[in-house]
Amino acid sequence: MKKLIFALSVMFVAVAMNQVSAQIEKGAKISFNKEVHDYGNIKYDGEPYCTFDFTNTGNEPLIISNAKGSCGCTVPEWPKEPIAPGAKGTIRVKYDTKRSGPINKSVTISSNAINEPEKVIRIKGEVGPAPESGVPVNNSGAPTNN
């Protein structure tokens, strides 16, 4: 009787382990090589673009349905076609560098990824001061005739 109970227990454990290994998650998964881009100190009206590379580490096509900047000064571009399993893609972000001061913005990416259906990536840095105008102006800001 003990041998029968032991044999049934071993069979039960073996079947349970087999079912667990058969439950592979199906779906797209997104994995970024970086989640923050640091512009550092950038010149006023300097190079506005940065890129975020990602890979579909899932087993179904990845579809990015939207990418939205935290304000109008942060504009993302993303692939509109599905990204095959194992394939790579790029999200390109343009920041308006005609704004002096610190940069601390985000882009929210919406997709069918089962690991992160909404992923937030960030940009940071500092835009230098605007160049001084070569035209002399009066107190009201109008050009003078000097």
Image (spheres, grey):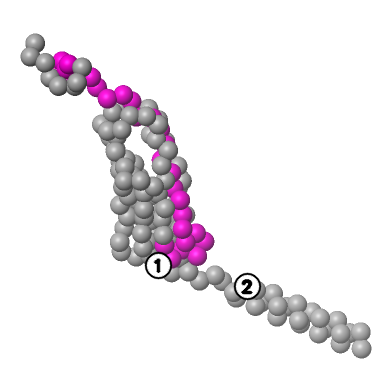
Would you place residue 145 above or below residue 45 in this image? above
> Secondary structure beneath disc 2?
helix
Which residue shows up at 12% across the image and 19% down it?
143
Which residue shows up at 44% across the image and 48% down it?
121
Q: Where on the picture, by quarter, is residue 8? A: bottom right
Would you place residue 30 above or below residue 125 in this image? below
Q: Name the residue beneath numbered marker 2.
A: 21
State how many labels appear: 2
| Mark 1 or 2: the one toward you | 1
- Please identify the residue farthest to the right as the structure is shown: 1
The N terminus, quarter of image? bottom right
Image: magenta residue range = 111-138
Which residue shows up at 39% across the image and 35% down it?
103
Amino acid type indicated by mark 2: Ser
Packing grade of label 1 (10 A; few <14, some 14-19, many >=20) is many
Q: Where on the picture, by quarter, is residue 123? A: top left
Q: Position of residue 28 (x, y in %)?
A: 45, 65
Would you place residue 2 above or below residue 56 in this image? below
Q: Main secondary structure of the magenta part?
A: loop
Q: Name the residue beneath numbered marker 1.
A: 61
Amino acid type indicated by mark 1: Pro
For the residues labelled 1 and 2, the Cα–Cα distance comes to 22 Å
- Please identify the residue farthest to the top as the structure is shown: 146
Q: Position of residue 7 (x, y in %)?
A: 82, 83
Q: Position of residue 126 (x, y in %)?
A: 38, 30
Task: Pick the residue in front: 35 or 17.
Answer: 35
Residue 85 at least partly seen: no
Which residue shows up at 43% across the image and 66% down it?
112
> Secondary structure beneath disc 1?
loop
